[in-house]
Image: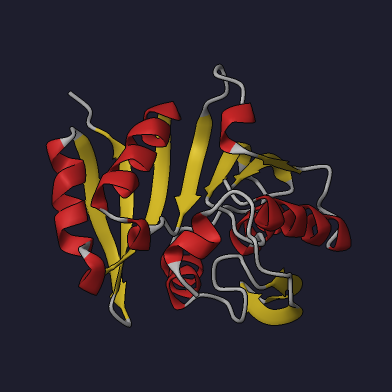
Amino acid sequence: MTAEHYFSAEPSAPAQRGEIQFSVGGRDYRLATASGVFSGGRLDPGTAVLLRKGDLPTAATTGVFLDLGCGYGPIAAVLAAEAPQALVWAIDVNSRARELTGENAASLGLAERIRVSEPDAVPAEVTFDQIWSNPPTHVGKAELHAVMERWLPRLAPGGVAWLVINRHLGGDSFHAWLVERGWEVERMASQKGYRVLRVTRKTD
């Protein structure tokens, strides 16, 4: 599956539906997937590393979260399940991905707290206490940087972004680029060729 395929707004190929199962934090998840969305055949290895190594919210965590590039919704589902007091925005340019995320949120009983949206429909005044993303490295460095420059500034004061990036697809240069752009970046884990980065605003 090419990057252009899952990164297109309206996938042209017929949707071949499937289902995946995975466990995070002692909870089991069963999600509907389909062709034409990112990693429709399995839980992406980078996403799995992010959910295993990132600092997941807890039942006491409140606020507004963003799943940036939600695909069929595994990150959004985990965030909403782990933090029942939080609201999760799940955004993706791919209409099929958004439909699947909405369907999965409903099947998990999380639809009231997962707000599925195309990127341009997120109100400008909305800020995020946490941003979680396995960003689209395959679309190229310029597009990846544009996505980050658009959404990272919408972190609320004291907010944190958790990002996973493939080391072989420019993970270390991406880390350096974020630092150059004025962000505080910590590499929190390295596993199976992926870097998990914690990104915050620099404090004086």
Residue at the top extreme, as displayed: 125
- Which image quadrant for residue 121? top right
Q: Residue at x 17, y 23 (%)?
A: 204
**Is residue 3 positioned above or below 42 on the image?**
above
* x then y, percent, for residue 37: 60, 65
**Is residue 13 positioned above or below 137 on the image?**
below
- Which image quadrant for residue 75? bottom right
**Is residue 167 positioned above or below 75 on the image?**
below
Q: Residue at x 61, y 51 (%)?
A: 94
**Is residue 198 positioned above or below 179 on the image?**
below
Q: Residue at x 66, y 68 (%)?
A: 13
- Which image quadrant for residue 66? top right
Residue 164 in view, yes or no? no
Q: Is residue 189 left or right of residue 14?
A: left
Q: Total number of numbered labels? A: 0
User: 53 or 142, which is in the foreground?
Assistant: 142
Q: Is residue 151 left or right of residue 5?
A: left
* x then y, percent, for residue 35: 65, 73
Q: Residue at x 14, y 57 (%)?
A: 173
* x then y, percent, for residue 136: 40, 57
Residue 178 in view, yes or no? yes
Q: Is residue 55 left or right of residue 164?
A: right
* x then y, percent, for residue 79: 63, 54
Q: How is the image coloured?
A: secondary structure
